[in-house]
């Protein structure tokens, strides 16, 4: 009997099960959703001279607010419009959440610990994360509503704006380090983090990350004031919770990649904890990714929303040339022999 | 520019012909919408370019002109106040001035200064409201929360002066209802210093934020002769280079005795309109300072009505500074005739025309509010702009639907 | 009011005296001009040429006792010399056939005000391209600001049990 439990625990703690399920997978994403949205609201409230989430557990400052929201979403009625295309309408949010989370299987959290260990983890993770906009357009089209179609069109435009700079910036770092595996990229940043080496690529990746996840100043897709929550207008109940979570999942995946490529991943590696169980040693990765997420969420208190053609212009006139410059910078660093 | 050879500023027949066809995408930004206010826009888009905007108003029409014909003159003051509740002294002051001209009574000097102070407090508060709403239309929630939080200070000052935060009903025919409380000057100075500091913060986070500038500059340009011809009023007019302000006409309040400079911007785009509002807040603070310094002593209700009160009541009114209405107010019968009055509200010039036939209820009251006059701008400015500019223009015009529908 | 303005107003009053039925300088800053409906456009164009380039209000006053509806245009100007002056242009149309020529070519900003006057008082402006309900709901019948307008009251039916 004890052997059975032993086998189960060993199965759970093995990388192919632990990574997608617990860390950096499902459980971590849920923890981040619950805490990050609350943190964002509290930070925005502090800037705006008010309290933010307050009434649930007053002594904790309203921290369980998101759990209350999740419970509310569970019990809310899911309204399906009569004229909507039912199967895509119901499937698309689940698909969005799933596709948003799939890239985590490739992201290593400690040396040698990843869901699938491969030496092409960087382009694979990025390529999988670019599948999310398809589900958003599917949502927009199936809801059969003029506002949602406008939102879907805006999503399509935004993908054109940010996708290429994102990839070129990430791949320029791959070029600089001479490898496309996230694990090796992190190992090469023991002394100098990637952001110091190639700040252009870091900047371009960060701004493209904000565009991709739809955070202010680029929340054009769900532009509340003009098109009433864009592609997500008709959703209610648990489907709404899923779509709202999907955009945060996308932000999370990209900030994990950002931390590993530019901020030296899990260094400084805590050897003692690592000896206990490998991912625990990579705690620094989680902390750094969380700080990046918190900063991205803080930006909503400073900015308004860009106009659609301005966002496109930023993507093509500013970010794309900068990313190409970052590429050349990496080439130069490689040739000179700094890296 | 001579009117004889002007190109038609707007060809209404062409504008009124709504375009239709395969490429036109019609969106109803209706009353149930997060940011449309109490009105509906029928927007016709061709791709991302707005071809036509039709504002559909009338959702908050409260039939004030008809109701005014069924009430006595003094009861119409709270009625008209509800048209623009955030700017209440200015909108009732127009009615009270028209009534005073009919009754041939002039308020005493102290009452005129007190009216000026409350008018300027309302103007500051209304401009903060306008800045907040313009911010939230661009999804800039910080300036929205800040502007509405800072309105609190001015509402508390108004509460000290009049007893109510928003529904002041302060001006009555012949004077005002209450006198200045003690310590008002110090509290105002504190508020003024705080507000000027905060306006710097607004500039840094909102007005001169490069992102917001990119949304406002060059958007919704209203040229100078267009503004004059279309009858634009208020900060929208002054941001296009026309130095017109009904306060300069000098026939109400104490403005003719105070020195102030009406600010004017030249460009006429949305950015100029936002800057204009911030400048006007600063000018209003100056006006209140001067008025408090130069405030004359004396009664706050005209002699003609004070002497109608019994002597004991008169003593009490003069001592405590709280006015009791004389009995004649319930049954004011102005002589038959018509008068006209204009007052500068925060959003522009409000126009009153009272027709009296000698009975206690008016025969006809006509009120044209500034938002109703700016309605033409909402029809004409967003054309040829992108869809997201519609809300930027709407926010910068500071259009207030309840005021426009009355 | 400056001397220049006074001179301008006086010359205007003299010029209008021959065209209008009655011109009166009611107060220092108010000039009342009464015209017949067929001379309306001509006098309005004259006023516009003199600098009164927009209209502050268009209103309709229902006078059932005289069986007319009086339409009043109040013109004003932003010009330095003429500000503060209001020219009231009054005209009377018969109550059972209230038709008037539109003035939106003379004063473009009368567009919405004429529409409102049609909506609330019932004066038809010939040539106005968009004479439909503005403040009332689109299927409303009747013109509320007339003196004989009666609000339709709906009964409330209550079912009692037992």
Image (cartoon, coloured by chain):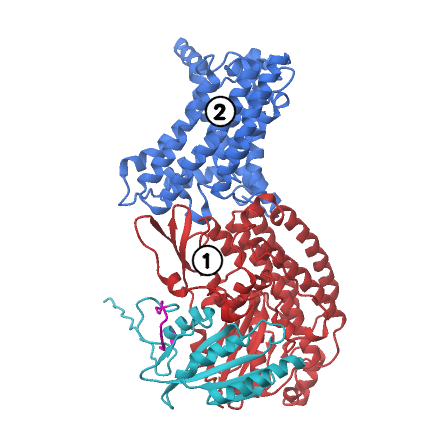
Chain colours: A blue, B red, C cyan
* Vertical position of residue B196 compared to residue A114: above or below: below
Residue at point 55% right, 51% down? Answer: B218
Q: Is residue C125 magenta?
A: yes
Q: Which residue is mark 1?
A: B37
Q: Position of residue C27 (x, y in %)?
A: 59, 86
Write down the region rendered in magenta.
C120-133
User: Mark 1: few, some, or many residues within 10 Å (few <14, many ≥20)?
Assistant: some
The residue positioned 52% from the left and 30% from the top of the image is A320
Label of residue B136 in the image: none
Asked whether B67 falls inside the magenta stretch, the response is: no
Q: Residue B266 versus residue B150: which sits nearer the camera?
A: B266
Residue C105 visible in image: yes
- The quadrant in which residue A124 appears is top left
Q: Relative to A192, does residue A84 appear above or below in the rendering?
A: below
Question: Disc 1 and disc 2: Cα gap in Å?
Answer: 42 Å
The residue wearing badge 2 is A167
Number of other residues with Cα within 10 Å of mark 2, as a class: few under 14, some 14 to 19, many 20 or more:
some
Quarter of the picture holding the N terminus of chain A: top left
The image quadrant that residue A93 belongs to is: top left
**Is residue A130 toward the left or the right of residue B161 in the image?**
left
């Amino acid at each position: 009997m004890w052997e059975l439990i032993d086998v189960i625990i060993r199965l759970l703690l093995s990388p192919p099960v632990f990574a997608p399920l617990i860390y950096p997978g499902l459980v971590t994403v849920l923890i981040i959703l619950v805490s990050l949205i609350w943190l964002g609201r509290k930070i925005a409230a502090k800037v705006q001279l008010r309290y933010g989430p307050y009434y649930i557990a007053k002594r904790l400052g309203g921290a369980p607010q998101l759990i209350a929201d999740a419970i509310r979403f569970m019990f809310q009625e899911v309204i399906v419009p009569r004229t909507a295309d039912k199967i895509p309408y119901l499937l698309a949010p689940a698909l969005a959440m799933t596709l948003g989370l799939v890239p985590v299987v490739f992201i290593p959290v400690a040396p040698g610990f990843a869901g699938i260990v491969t030496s092409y983890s960087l382009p694979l993770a990025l390529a999988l994360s670019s599948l999310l906009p398809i589900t958003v357009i599917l949502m927009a089209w199936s809801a059969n509503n003029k506002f949602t179609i406008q939102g879907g069109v805006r999503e399509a435009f935004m993908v054109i704006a940010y996708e290429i700079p994102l990839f070129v910036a990430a791949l320029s770092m791959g070029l600089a380090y001479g490898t496309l595996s996230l694990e090796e990229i992190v190992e090469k940043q023991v002394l100098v983090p990637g952001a110091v080496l190639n700040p252009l690529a870091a900047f371009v990746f960060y701004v493209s990350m904000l565009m991709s996840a739809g955070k202010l100043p680029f929340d054009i897709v769900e532009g509340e004031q003009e098109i009433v929550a864009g592609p997500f207008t008709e959703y209610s109940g648990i489907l709404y919770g899923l779509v709202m979570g999907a955009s945060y999942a996308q932000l999370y995946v990209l900030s994990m990649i950002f931390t590993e490529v530019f901020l030296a991943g899990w260094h400084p590696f805590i050897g003692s904890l690592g000896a206990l169980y490998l991912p625990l040693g990579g705690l620094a990765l989680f902390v750094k990714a969380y700080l990046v997420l918190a900063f991205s969420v803080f930006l909503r208190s400073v900015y308004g929303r860009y106009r659609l053609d301005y966002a496109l212009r930023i993507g093509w006139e500013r970010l794309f040339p900068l990313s190409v410059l970052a590429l050349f910078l990496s080439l130069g660093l490689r040739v000179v022999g700094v890296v | 520019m001579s009117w004889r050879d002007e190109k038609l500023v707007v060809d209404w027949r062409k504008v009124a012909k709504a375009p239709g066809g395969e490429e036109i995408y019609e969106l109803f930004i209706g009353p149930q919408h997060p940011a449309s206010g109490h009105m509906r826009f029928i927007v016709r888009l061709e791709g991302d370019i707005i071809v036509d905007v039709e504002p559909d108003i009338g959702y908050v029409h409260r039939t004030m002109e008809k109701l005014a014909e069924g009430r006595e003159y003094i009861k119409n003051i709270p009625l008209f106040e509800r048209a623009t509740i955030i700017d209440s002294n200015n909108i009732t002051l127009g009615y009270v001035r028209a009534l005073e001209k009919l009754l041939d009574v002039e308020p005493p000097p102290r009452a005129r200064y007190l009216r000026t102070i409350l008018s300027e407090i309302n103007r500051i508060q209304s401009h903060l409201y306008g800045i907040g709403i313009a911010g939230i239309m661009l999804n800039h929630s910080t300036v929205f929360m800040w502007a509405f939080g800072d309105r609190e200070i001015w509402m508390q000052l108004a509460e000290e002066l009049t007893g109510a935060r928003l529904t002041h009903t302060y001006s009555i025919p012949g004077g005002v209802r209450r006198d200045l409380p003690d310590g008002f000057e110090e509290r105002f100075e504190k508020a003024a210093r705080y507000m000027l500091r905060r306006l710097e913060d607004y500039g840094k986070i909102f007005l001169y934020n490069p992102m917001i500038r990119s949304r406002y500059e060059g958007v919704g340009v209203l040229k100078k002769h267009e503004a004059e011809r279309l009858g634009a009023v208020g900060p929208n007019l002054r941001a296009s280079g026309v130095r017109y302000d009904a306060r300069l006409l000098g026939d109400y309040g104490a403005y003719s005795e105070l020195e102030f400079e009406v600010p004017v911007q030249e460009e006429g785009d949305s950015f100029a309109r936002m800057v204009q509002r911030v400048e006007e807040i600063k000018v209003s603070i100056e006006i209140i300072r001067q008025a408090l310094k130069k405030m004359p002593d004396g009664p706050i209700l005209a002699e003609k009505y004070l002497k109608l009160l019994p002597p004991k009541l008169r003593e009490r009114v003069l001592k405590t500074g709280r006015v009791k209405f004389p009995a004649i107010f319930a049954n004011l019968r102005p002589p038959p005739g018509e008068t006209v009055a204009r007052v500068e509200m925060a959003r522009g010039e409000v126009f009153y025309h009272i027709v009296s036939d000698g009975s206690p209820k008016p025969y006809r009251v006509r009120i044209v509010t500034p938002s109703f006059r700016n309605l033409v701008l909402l029809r004409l400015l967003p054309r040829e702009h992108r869809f997201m500019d519609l809300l930027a223009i709407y926010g910068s015009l500071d259009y207030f639907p309840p005021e426009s529908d009355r | 009011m400056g001397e220049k303005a006074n001179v301008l107003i006086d010359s205007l009053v003299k010029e209008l005296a021959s065209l209008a039925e009655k011109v009166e300088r009611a107060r220092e800053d108010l000039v009342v001009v009464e015209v017949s409906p067929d001379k309306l456009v001509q006098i309005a164009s004259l006023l516009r040429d003199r600098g009164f380039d927009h209209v502050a209000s268009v209103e309709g006053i229902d006078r059932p006792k005289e069986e007319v509806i009086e339409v009043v245009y109040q013109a004003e100007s932003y010009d330095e010399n003429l500000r503060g002056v209001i020219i009231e242009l009054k005209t009377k149309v018969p109550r059972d056939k209230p038709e008037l020529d539109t003035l939106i070519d003379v004063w473009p900003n009368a567009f919405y005000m004429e529409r409102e006057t049609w909506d609330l008082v019932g004066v038809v402006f010939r040539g106005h391209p968009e004479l439909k309900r503005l403040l009332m709901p689109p299927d409303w019948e009747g013109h509320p600001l007339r003196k004989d307008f009666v609000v339709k009251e709906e009964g409330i039916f209550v079912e009692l049990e037992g």
